Amino acid sequence: MTDKTSPGKVDMDKMVSLCKRRGYIFQSSEIYGGLGSCWDYGPLGVELKRNIKDAWWKTNVQEREDMVGLDSAIIMHPQIWVASGHVEGFSDPLVECKNCHLRWRTDAITEGKCSSCGGELTEPRMFNLMFRTFMGPVEEQASTVYMRPETAQGIFVNFSNVLTTSRKKLPFGIAQIGKAFRNEITPGNFIFRSREFEQMEIEYFVKPGNDEKWFNFWLEERLNWYIKLGIDKDHLKLRHHGEDELAHYARDCYDIEYLFPMGWAELEGIANRGEFDLQRHSLSSGRALNYFDEETGQNITPFVIEPSAGVDRSTLAFLLDAYEEEQDKEGIRVILHLHPSLAPVKVAVLPLSRNEKLVPLSREIWSRLRSSWMTQYDDAQSIGRRYRRQDEIGTPFCVTIDFQSLEDNAVTVRERDSMQQIRVPIDNLKAVIAAKLAGEAFEEANPGGS
Ligand code: ATP
């Protein structure tokens, strides 16, 4: 019997070790001892992350008539960060231990003492989280630029460019996926909080007065996206921000929280930012960032609803929620029940043995499948071991080529979650896997097989 492990109970150390062992995620700069809270995505991690970003883009850009994409630069005019309020206000309160000199965000301190050595702490001071660097060959104040701490500002400053070139009417949105950098004081919990990460952000522009309706729309839309891609709805919740907690720009805000091993924590923030950003950049740049409303014949500043998600936090949540351990006769079997559209490898091709007749047929099948999906070919060790290896990385389908295949031109397809096996004619194989990936039942996808 299987018992789905609750993610609140999945041990983070187990996940870190699985990710390293199987090539999902490595500590950055590992051979030099690692670099604080930066992570590298290995051969499987890069596929998972790319699939998550593709799924987000498909739902939010490709399938919508009211959305367009953008890819703005990481380094932007420094005045942008003055206008947005980041230079002045994007800071966390920091305290330092007088004894061991470790620095902490004040909310990471529980008893007024250093969480590492118990030493006395300094008074809190504000610490700006933006990374600074210099542009051009002269390292001076005037050439200071920032690594963006969010992708959103690149969208706001391109509002007019996108509006005039895409000829969109309100309401419409601009979506962007890209790197962001924050010099976090107390990073941690694996890829949950790192100093370099990726965001998937939407700025959705609406007529003032319609903002509440669209705010509610995006709350539901974004919550359902995680559920549709396989996260248990009981492991997700919406948390409303209290008045005292709202960021300076926000009229209203909810966090979508996930039940991580360390407890409920933010996966995505959804804010009603009103007209704050467009207005600030209009004033600061001297360029009007508004919209001509044909109905009233007036120029208006749209309000904006912002669903802001983290690629890395989503990756972690999808991995944790997919994780299951099962006791079988060989010990503990780990299965990642990743949604097939997110799984890094869709199909594994496994000849029953390294027999000289099976290998060429298997390699031919493998090369046919490679043009459609990420695949793996594995002929090392017993077939049972190989199924386990594929289950552990979340591969939804394994194709086994055996001696009978040489006679009947059919192969066995095994499904990860049900462990059901069906015999499929080689000529049908691609169609069957495509139908399965599109969500059809196993039998229906294989009318000619058994
Ligand atoms: P937190 O309160 O956890 O620091 P935040 O409220 O500052 O997060 P936002 O500014 O709302 O985060 O950023 C939007 C999203 O970007 C977050 O929901 C999260 O998924 C992601 N994110 C923010 N900071 C980090 C980080 N340091 N590492 C990984 N992802 C991050």
Image (cartoon, rainbow, N blue to C red):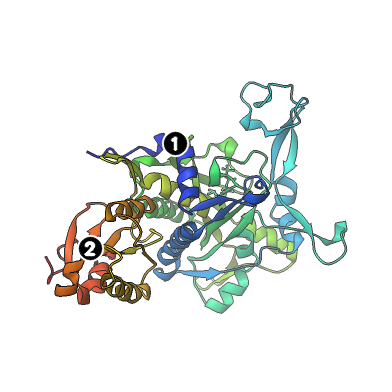
Determine contact: label 2, label 1, CB under 8 Å.
no
Q: Residue at x 74, y 21 (%)?
A: 120
Pinpoint residue 247: horizontal percent, then vertical percent. 61, 44
What secondary structure is marked by label 2?
A: strand
Outermost residue toward the front in this view: 356
- Mark 2 residue's CB less than 8 Å from ligand 1: no
Checking the image for residue 413, the label placed there is: 2
Is the N terminus in the top left, top right, bottom left or bottom right quadrant? top left
- Mark 1 residue's CB less than 8 Å from ligand 1: no
191 up-or-down from 67: above or below: above
Checking the image for residue 244, the label placed there is: none
Q: Residue at x 74, y 67 (%)?
A: 286
Q: Say whether residue 85 is left or right of residue 48.
A: right
Pinpoint residue 165: horizontal percent, then vertical percent. 57, 78
Q: CA distance from mark 2 to mark 1?
A: 32 Å
Q: Nearer the viewer, residue 445 or 43?
A: 43
Label 2 amino acid?
Val
What secondary structure is marked by label 1?
A: loop
Q: Nearer the viewer, residue 134 or 292?
A: 134
> Which numbered mark, 2 or 1, is in the foreground of this view?
2
Q: Say whether residue 9 is left or right of residue 151.
A: left
Crowd around label 2: few <14 · some 14–19 · many ≥20 (10 Å):
many
205 up-or-down from 197: above or below: below
Label 1 amino acid?
Asp
Is residue 349 at least partly visible in the picture?
yes
Pinpoint residue 327: horizontal percent, then vertical percent. 28, 38
Is residue 256 at least partly visible in the picture?
no
Is the C terminus in the top left, top right, bottom left or bottom right quadrant? bottom left
Crowd around label 1: few <14 · some 14–19 · many ≥20 (10 Å):
some
227 up-or-down from 65: above or below: above
Q: Say whether residue 143 is left or right of residue 148.
A: right
Reading the image, the residue beneath label 1 is 11
